[in-house]
Amino acid sequence: MNKNHTKQVELSNVFLPVIFSKSDLERVINEQIDGTLFDEKITEGGFKIQVSKASKIRLSIQETTIFYSVPLRIWLRKQMILGDIEAQGDIVINFKTILNIGSEWTVSAKTQIVDYKWLSVPKASLMGLKIPVRNIAETVIRRLKQQVTDTIDKQVNDHFVLKQYATSIWQMLQNPMLVSADYQTRFKFIPKQVTFAPFLTESDTILSTLHIQGSTEINVGATDTFLPNSSLSPLTIQDINGQKEAQLVIQSKIPLGEVQKVVLQQFRGQNFQFGAQGLQFEGLLIEKVGEVLQLKVRTSGSYEGWLTLVGTPNFDTEKNTIQLKDVSFQLDTSNITVATPKWSIQGPLTNQLAGDLTYHFEEDLTNLKTILQQQMNQTIFQKGVHVLANIRQIRLQKAYFTETALLLTIRVEGTVKVLVERLTINEQ
């Protein structure tokens, strides 16, 4: 291998905004918390108390803290000899839950009551005597504080199993993607590291950003040369919101045997005419010798046998082409009958091949762009959660031959988003 072409793996970097609706998250929470929340007799004053949700719970998220306002209706009743005491009031209790997300994808929640505000104060009287039910209600709230916050924390810890979800997505990302059945070409992304940005709330949108770094490969042929799957990496938390670009750097090592199939498919049956003579390509062997490439071609037509084409591979990353330049050839006179002196056909044939021995990657790159975008846009992590990808550009960045393979580096640029259109909660 040319020492100037020492293989250096450039990692792909994908900034992945995750966008979901605040109102949809509120919908899920309100579906989970509904109806009567508390209904029992308490010791303070012998009152029976019933607490229910008065209207919709509202929330916001900032970084790793969830703020939510819970409107409650409190009904109190006590049977007495002289009559029943009954009162009702509405109160809004403001909670906050601080999420502690660890590097091993663990999530723990700590909830506390921030404050509360009476919207309508419960009042009761018996025979003109005012009964201090507000004090009783506030005593109940203080008693319920630990019970309510413990319940919220348990719900978060039980249902928000972040490591389980992350492992599932991590493995799904590494499933090879079929690019071309004809050439047995598959694409694979192997994540190495992931960074998570704290949440932001903007109007009705809750936003976070994931930065996934990894290696991207294309495998051509029946033999699987992909690197093995990686295990879930530790999680890093960093403020990367606002970064949206996705850059895939695709490495492809195509064995010369597979290159031979592709080139032969392009040139098989073509008629190379020079004067009254002509030949067609029927078979092909490719070898890299030093800085030149040797193509041993089996021909039919005016010349039946083998000829060896020798030239210097030239890669034009602007035109996305590989061209064999300074082509010369040698006839295998032991297997070919030449009725015309070699010098009289070498010039015309070489001149014709010099223009024809060019492989254009443009069509391959266009097909790869279309397939990658289609496959990404068809990715569904779960019901209501899907990917929106837009590939702006795909180009050949680097290409060179080794003694055994053609090595390509392809750069893909664009944007990828995860849209959460409808949240669901899986009960355990």
Image (tube, helix red, strand yellow):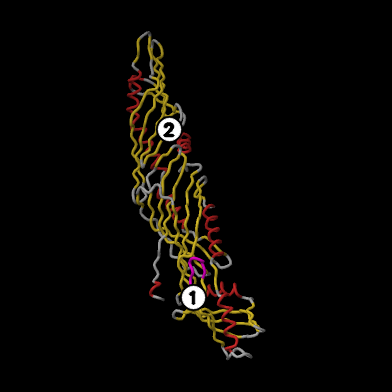
266 left or right of 78 in image: right
Q: Nearer the viewer, residue 117 or 205?
A: 205
Part of the protein shown in magenta: 312-321
Q: Nearer the viewer, residue 321 or 257?
A: 321
Query: Residue at (46%, 65%) from the top-left corner?
Result: 397
Let me know if residue 68 appears in the view.
yes
80 left or right of 349 in image: left
Dot 2 alpha-carbon crowd within 10 angstroms: few under 14, some 14 to 19, many 20 or more: some
Q: Quadrant of residue 60?
A: top left
Residue 367 part of the magenta-drawn span: no
Amino acid type, label 1: Pro
Q: Which mark is residue 400?
A: none
390 left or right of 348 in image: left
Query: Residue at (46%, 30%) from the top-left corner?
Result: 56
Disc on the earlier residue, 1 or 2: 2
Let me know if residue 178 appears in the view.
no
Q: Quadrant of the N terminus?
A: bottom left
Q: Quadrant of residue 131?
A: top left
| Number of numbered discs on residues | 2
Q: Which mark is residue 58?
A: 2
Across and down, in percent, residue 86 comes to 41, 16
Above or below, 298 relative to 374: below
Q: Mark 1 or mark 2: which is in front?
A: 1
Q: Which mark is residue 313?
A: 1
Above or below, 285 relative to 249: below
* Marks 1/2: CA–CA distance: 65 Å
Q: What SS does tag 1 mark?
A: strand
Q: Nearer the viewer, residue 162 or 306?
A: 306
Amino acid type, label 2: Arg
